[in-house]
Amino acid sequence: MALKKHILELQKKRQEVQMGGGEKAIEKQVAMGKMTARDRINTLLDENSFQEYDMFVQHDARDFDMAKKVLHGDGVVIGTGNVSGKPVCIFAQDFTVAGGSLGLMHSRKIVKIMDHALKMKVPLIGINDSGGARIQEGVNSLAGYGEIFFRNTISSGVIPQISVILGPCAGGAVYSPALTDFVFVVENISKMFITGPEVIKTVLGEEISMEDLGGARVHSEITGNAHFFAKSEQECFDQIKKLLSMIPANNKRKAVKTTPKPPKAAYKIGEIVPEDPSLPYDVRDVIKAIVDDSDFFEIMQNWAANMVIGFGRMNGETCGFVCNQPLVMAGVLDVDSSDKAARFIRYCDAFDIPIITLEDLPGYLPGVDQEHAGVIRHGAKILYAYSEATVPKLTVILRKAYGGGYIAMGSRHLRADFVFAWPTAEIAVMGPEGAANIIFRKEITEASDPNEMRRQKVQEYKEKFANPYVAASRGYIDSVIAPEETRNILLHALEVSVEKKVELPDKKHGLPPF
Ligand code: HXC
């Protein structure tokens, strides 16, 4: 009987906490199309798998009338559970409680679950819905964020860290995600900024909406802060599940292997690349013609779309794809596409995921805009990332491989293990037109028919250099292969690379061009 009383009391206490900021605040949250923190966790995790901790934690702030305030769970829900049967650590900030703002005890809860994730070597998922550092708690809130940033950094490359932005997130609530591996946003719901419109109005006298300042589209199309864009919270959770199914739980494991499946017959690899090198095509069709079941999981689809990155499986094993996209700006390398590829290469390398590069690009993008945006520094990141990566690196040159682009996109010289080229490959310092205009300028200008002379010289250059055989004669590429042979040759290359082990020189760490 006495026990029953205690149980009833426990249930009552739990219910109180589960009401977060109260009925009204929850109604407001739901009216904005948002789930509550616990609903989010329960929707994302396997049914009944969530185990919550620190439910009864309270803040102990005293300033600004805080002593009178009860903040249930101090505005954050933490715990462990499963996604598709695999364990994860998770936290979800509760915007209904003081705007999900981060006070000292709130931060200690997050830190506790982060420490568990690192210790247990399982992925960490953070659902962020927070106005950032709790203003009333002053430096204690800043200290809390500092502890989180430190753990984000120390855990980087050991366990996957996934951030979900599901509300207006400011300050530390966006800097922690920026330190994690993958950031998910949802249309109309996610906002990210270091300071909100209110502060901007006060400091700069400018009015701007939260959406224009840092909405989901801004971050998935303009800034590159977000890796995945969804139209609803449910779609976002499905994306997270898919991602988790394709990546390893930590840096000592492999992703779960699936039953090998051939690509779908609809993707005919020999018919995708047009014969005319000036015509575009969608490189994702080539990827889909190579990977198991034509299932390609693209990352950062709407930012720096001249570079395509993502995961696909080869005979059931996850591989990372880094591919120029001729459909967008001819697949050129620029500041953003270099950043995008370099970071992804480092992700694959940290988590032991082989990298497959599909190459077709006219080189680095020339021009004042790019030079002033720092294309030298940013473009160097991709050189660094490929050179440093010790996972199996396989490259297929589909068509153009010009200049710095040839070197940058996983060339033999940056230690690709296997480099293949289709017969349509053109490997040279620059494209035939540009090259002919420079090296045959005198002959062209002095000819009685300069246009005819240019045509002849372009043809001459093409025959000499715009093919894969010069590179093949030097051993810079290993084989010239037919498109239809690509999947099997890559599968073979992956198979023989399974035990690859490369030691880099002993050093504390290198200095990538951050
Ligand atoms: C304390 C906060 C808060 C905060 C919101 N609230 N942010 N309380 N500290 N940082 C409270 C509000 O007072 C309000 O409480 C409730 O949460 C909901 O907030 P609203 O403003 O009504 O919501 P909305 O209009 O949707 O605006 C959300 C917002 C805005 C854009 C996040 O609240 C905002 O701009 N907050 C401040 C953002 C910010 O500058 N944070 C500090 C960042 S510095 P009531 O009781 O009225 O419901 C930082 C340091 C880290 O984080 C440094 C990183 C390097």
Image: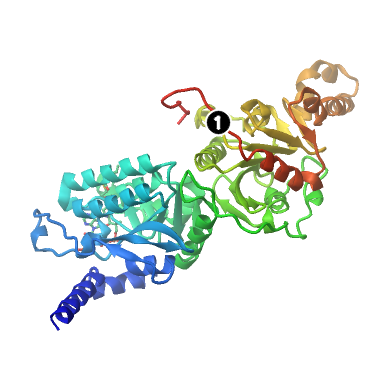
Does residue 332 appear to the left or right of 204 in the view shown?
Answer: right
Q: State the image coordinates of residue 177 (x, y, percent, origin top left).
A: 38, 48
As displayed, is residue 506 above or below residue 379? above
| 89 sits to left or right of 371 | left
Q: Quadrant of residue 97?
A: bottom left
Label 1 belongs to which residue?
Answer: 379
Q: How many marks?
A: 1
Q: Decide: is 316 above or below 391.
A: below
Q: Is residue 174 at least partly visible in the picture?
A: yes
Residue 86 lies, in percent from the top left, at 46, 59
Q: Quadrant of ligand 1?
A: bottom left
Per the image, label 1 sits on a secondary structure element best described as: helix
Q: Percent position (x, y) of residue 82?
A: 42, 62
Kind of residue at badge 1: Gly
450 up-or-down from 357: above or below: above
Residue at 30% of width from left, 47% of height from top?
A: 172
